[in-house]
Image: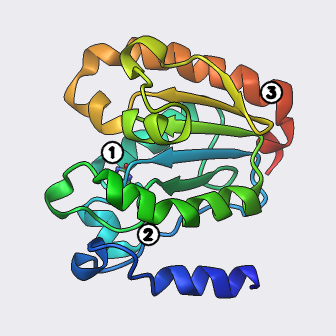
Amino acid sequence: MQWKEYKQSCYECRCCPLCETRRNVVFGVGPEDADVMFIGEGPGEQEDKTGEPFVGAAGQLLDRMLSIIGLSRKNCYIANIVKCRPPQNRDPLLTEQDACYPWLEAQIEYVAPKIIICLGRIAAMKLIREDYRITKEHGTWTERNGIQMTAIYHPSALLRDVSKRPETFSDLLNIREKVREIAPKTFEY
Ligand code: URA
């Protein structure tokens, strides 16, 4: 199947009950040849309304975090573990994550990033390790299938708890170093 058709079938997905309550499938945004990919948890209310990831309050903070290190939506790809909004913004259930995972897996294969940054524990537990401890392990690097992976606190967590921001700032600087080292074209978009 061509990528365009694949994307279209994702927009019509009925693989889990989240399809019953969604307004829009939030597929992902960014250049489809990006070397850097950010993966969050799942759409919230604003994302469900607009069909774009990270456009609410957490998204505005994410934009500021990216700009600190010279990144932006123009040079990174942004997606989520689940593409439909969990009601009341609850954590996506494992069954929902598993049902949605093949879409993300294909997306990662298609975009073929060199670096993946998980935003928060849900993404880290799905993509890095089931027992990933974000409080202890954020900012550390792991390689998976030739992709450098790390996790930082979710921007929503940083909105709730500003004491986590200094640690995240140093994680961001460390991410900038990694991007300079293995994906310098990112800064040229
Ligand atoms: N939180 C997420 O994890 N993803 C979004 O797209 C928005 C908020």
Dot 2 alpha-carbon crowd within 10 angstroms: few under 14, some 14 to 19, many 20 or more: many
Ligand 1 within 8 Å of disc 1? The answer is yes
Please report the residue visible at 40 percent of the width from the left and 34 percent of the height from the top.
Answer: 120
Quarter containing the N terminus: bottom right
Reply above or below: 139 against 128: above
Would you identify the image quadrant in which residue 181 lies?
A: top right
Ligand 1 within 8 Å of disc 3? The answer is no
Ligand 1 within 8 Å of disc 2? The answer is yes
Dot 2: element: loop
Q: Which residue is mark 1?
A: 58
Q: Which residue is mark 2?
A: 26
Q: Which mark is residue 141?
A: none
Dot 3: element: helix
Mark 3 vs 2, N-terminal side: 2
Judge left or right: residue 103 versus residue 112: left
Q: Which residue is mark 3?
A: 180
Mark 3 vs 1, N-terminal side: 1
Whether pointer 3 and pointer 2 mark residues with C-beta atoms closer than 8 Å, the reply is no
